[in-house]
Image: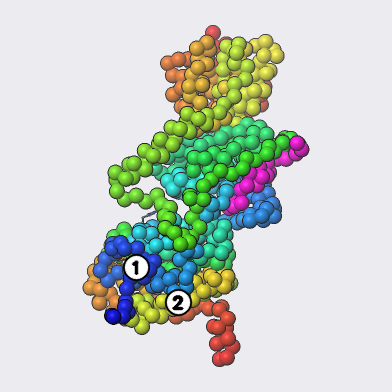
Amino acid sequence: MNKFLMSGNNIIGEAAIRAGCRFYAGYPITPQNELTEYMAEHMRNAEGGVFIQSESEVAAIHMITGAAAAGARVMTSSSSPGISLKQEGISSLAACELPSVIVNIMRGGPGLGNIRPAQGDYFQATRGGGHGDYRTIVFGPATCQELADLTMDAFDLADKYRTPVMILADGMMGQMMEPVIFKKPKPRQYSENFMLRGAGDGKSKIIRGLILDAIDMEEHNWKLARKYEVITKSEIRYETYQTDDAELVVVAYGTAARIAKGAIKRLREHNKVKAGLFRPITLWPFPETQLRSLSGKIKDFLVFEMSTGQMLEDVRLSLQGYADIGFHGRPGGAVPTPAELANVIARYYEKKD
Amino acid sequence: MAKVIFQRPKYLKENVFHYCPGCGHSIAHRLIAEVIEEMGIRGITIGVPPAGCAVLAYNYFDLDMIEAQHGRGPALATGLKRTLPDRFVFSYQGDGDLAAIGIAESFHAANRGENITVFFINNAVYGMTGGQMAPTTILEQRTTTTPAGRHKTLDGYPVKVCELLSQLPGVAYAQRCTLTSPAQVNKTKKAIRKAFQCQKDALGFSIVEILSPCPTNWKMSPIDACKWIDEVMSKEFPLDVFKDITPAAQKNTEAV
Ligand SMILES: Cc1ncc(C[n+]2csc(CCOP(=O)(O)OP(=O)(O)O)c2C)c(N)n1
Ligand code: SF4
């Protein structure tokens, strides 16, 4: 298979088109503009491909809702402030059970923040983000190859569970270039029964989230909850790195996990700390039991995030009472080098002794 | 054998409307259903109801339908139509839905010349939420949020949607009509038909604005509500064709 050297943003676009995405709507925002531009350049060349530069992120999410209902594979992308605007539509997509892929190339926040890489949108992504009782599957890729693979998988999972799937990366992942191989996409498995294409001579269909009767609405919420339970049982992904003999395990995702890997290598090379890495790949569902299973032999965990501590809460839910949990955070677009992080880890470990 | 001269349109379901007596939504629904039946396009039409009194429109239209969040109908309809260019797609919206929260989506769908149709029910209030001021509330009109009447410097001016959108090159057809007499009802039905025809001929964005009574929130009898439209509301919102690029209309203007 051919190898391509591409930037993260372009990789997402190429993987989406290869996966059969035929409807993209988006609004410019740094640091994800290259993705919108990639779709502008390539989507209309794909058969049946639609690209729309929408008037806002709000419009974009509702455009993909219409296209998803009509049966297209759909995607929109943005960065933090724009993702906030999309939440109304993401909630609707979840309620109406419409498959869709949403990419968040996170930047520093809150507010307008800055355009530096950050991980401050973890809560928003993993807790549903919009109003109501729902979840979205959230992938936290850490390499360009993973961006390609997970983008393709996102479309398959969106169809399989009829739910929005989010790819949560940051400005660093969006801008960095690495060689990638695009895997062969799987044939689409999605029933026409779920598509709205005009009733023909048959019975008309309704897609809606409005359910006025409280008991019926309750049942719809439980139906969604049961689906989320199945996803939690079947779709968790994570990576462990050098945890077998580790005295301390760093828990990190995405760009933070890349930096942590570099730091861990360094610490081991200098015989300082035998550290390992636990890296959630699905941020929701969070690999809770998988993380807890490490606490049998390892009692020291250090969470590293480019935020003031958000995934930290999931780590606590997994490990509280089983192990000691430390935290190191760099919010607002500050990105430490692996050497800096190695020092932090070493100091943390020494202090504990 | 008795001859049937009036019956339920084929593509209105057997459900009883939840609309108040004298409400314009019921008549507008009926007209749209009649036109869809006459044009034979039921099987290839997808409707988008709004958040508003017509939120349950899918309980009445026997059509494929998908709800939109408040004001987002034209964006959703854009996604449907671009994916299924050979289907008829319409968005049905109130004045709060279209001209307040959804003005951006409406304006830009029109500006892109999306080949969709918008049915715009202008009743000068927010019906569903209890009669608050709408962007189309006229000056001095009392609503629950303009208890002393709409004040131009404090509350702004009524938004004239057809006048605004007809400026955009993407708009093929914009007409304002009403439902206050059989003659007006017939005119409105013709406008609905023309709007769908525009879509059929891929001419671009079409909008039919319907001045529509809301007796409940206007606190009037249905008859007084119609009178108010004729005597007051239609002075602010003149009944007119604001844009018509259909070939027939073009010929007429050339002849003048
Ligand atoms: C985001 C959002 N904000 C507010 C509402 C509440 N809401 C529902 S309908 C409506 C206004 C309806 O007025 P209009 O569009 O004029 O339609 P009508 O009911 O008069 O037909 C409002 C404010 C909502 N559903 N969603
Ligand atoms: S409140 Fe007004 S718009 Fe709503 S159903 Fe009643 S009359 Fe119609």
Which residue lies at the image location 59% right of the left edge and 21% below the top edge? A240
Q: Quadrant location of ligand 1? A: bottom left
Residue A15 in magenta? Answer: yes
Which residue lies at the image location 50% right of the left edge and 30% below the top edge? A234
Q: Residues within 10 Å of mark 1 (few under 14, many from 20)?
A: many
Horizontally, residue A308 falls left or right of residue A342, namely: left
- What is the chain letter for disc 2? B
- x and y, in percent, of residue A292 in the image: 48, 19
Marking on residue B222 = none
Q: Residue pushed farthest right?
A: A2
Q: SS class of the residue under badge 2?
A: helix
Marking on residue B191 = 2
Q: SS class of the residue under badge 1?
A: helix
Is A3 situated above or below A64? above
Q: Which of B160 and B75 is in front in this view?
A: B75
Residue B151 in magenta? Answer: no
- x and y, in percent, of residue B254 in the image: 59, 88
Q: Which of A110 and B188 is in front in this view?
A: B188
Question: Badge 1 is on which residue?
Answer: B25
Which residue lies at the image location 68% right of the left edge and 39% below the top edge? A184
Q: Residue pushed farthest top?
A: A353
Horizontally, residue B226 falls left or right of residue A41, namely: left
Q: Quadrant of residue B33?
A: bottom left
Which of the image's four quarters has the N terminus of chain A? top right
Q: How crowded is mark 2: few (under 14 residues within 10 Å), some or many (20 or more)?
A: many
Q: What stretch is highlighted in magenta?
A: A1-27
Residue B34 seen in the current view: yes
Q: Rounded to the nearest whole Å, what is the CA distance between mark 2 and mark 1? A: 16 Å
* Residue type at the position of mark 1: His
Q: Is mark 2 within 8 Å of ligand 1?
A: no
Number of marks in the rendered image: 2
